[in-house]
Image (cartoon, rainbow, N blue to C red):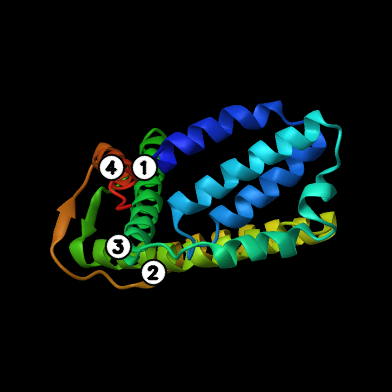
Amino acid sequence: MRSAAVLIEENNQKRELLNDENLGLYEEFLLYIRTDLRVDEQAGEEVLMDLLDHLLEAQEEDKAATDLFGESPQVYANELIEALPNEKKRNAALFIFSQVLSIAGWFSIMFGVVTLIMSFFQEVDNSIPLGNILVILGSVVVFSLSAVSIVFKIVRTTLFASKKKRVLGYVKAGLFSGGAVGLIMLLAWIVPDFGPMIRLEWWVYVLSGLVLLVVYKLLGRMKLY
């Protein structure tokens, strides 16, 4: 049995054979299934590969995508999802935890880079209370946990929808992400200093972020099928 990673790689290559119209519709199916956290990844990728094969066959026979998916692709996609097994709880937990690490990793890298850039223009105090670091980390974790499900839900509302609804969905996702980051920054600013002071240079944040991203990648390979 081909693993989900192998199926994803094959899918990426075979999708290039679709024409623009079929590619657009198929990628909506792809996102709709992949952003449903309830769906078992292995089963989902197998169904997506079957759909791609059928769509390529229909394309070679000059058939329209509606001949395969019907007049309501979203209804067809929902029927497929209902027939798929649920993701194992261990895999779902690993996925969510890996996303938390990814967001925390990028946040740490960006913070380190910003600190480095600021140091060229002004003196930067690299001392920070340990308690404040814990507050920031806690805020990032809470934001990440909510962001995974909320952003995925927003993305799903833009699929099989009008252009206006898609734009509105992207705006909502952007506002949510920007607002969450702003809230984290606000908490870091208004929370009074507490705990012992420690000194962290910019490269410590960058290195820590890179380590988190490596762990994120490793967790992606630990799924139980």
Name the element at disc 4. helix
Is residue 158 shown left or right of residue 147?
right
* Amino acid type of the residue tagged 3 in the rendering: Arg
The answer to whether marks 4 and 2 mark residues whose Cβ atoms lie closer than 8 Å is: no
Q: Which residue is mark 3?
A: 90
* Amino acid type of the residue tagged 1 in the rendering: Ile
Is residue 56 shown left or right of residue 219?
right
Q: Cα distance, mark 1 to mark 2?
A: 19 Å
Up the image or down, 173 lies above or below 5; here it is below
Q: Cα distance, mark 4 to mark 1?
A: 19 Å
* Amino acid type of the residue tagged 4 in the rendering: Leu
Name the element at disc 2. helix
Q: Nearer the viewer, residue 166 or 189?
A: 166
Name the element at disc 3. helix
Q: Nearer the viewer, residue 217 or 104?
A: 217
Taking the spot 62% from the left edge, 48% from the top edge, the residue there is 30
Q: Which residue is mark 2?
A: 142
Residue 194 image offset from top left, x and y in percent: 21, 71
Query: How many residues crowd mark 4 within 10 Å: few (<14), some (14–19), many (20+)?
Result: few
> How many numbered marks are there?
4
**Mark closest to the chain's N terminus, 1 or 2:** 1
Q: Cα distance, mark 3 to mark 2?
A: 20 Å
Q: Which residue is mark 1?
A: 109
* Amino acid type of the residue tagged 2 in the rendering: Val
The answer to whether marks 1 and 2 mark residues whose Cβ atoms lie closer than 8 Å is: no
Q: Which residue is mark 4?
A: 218
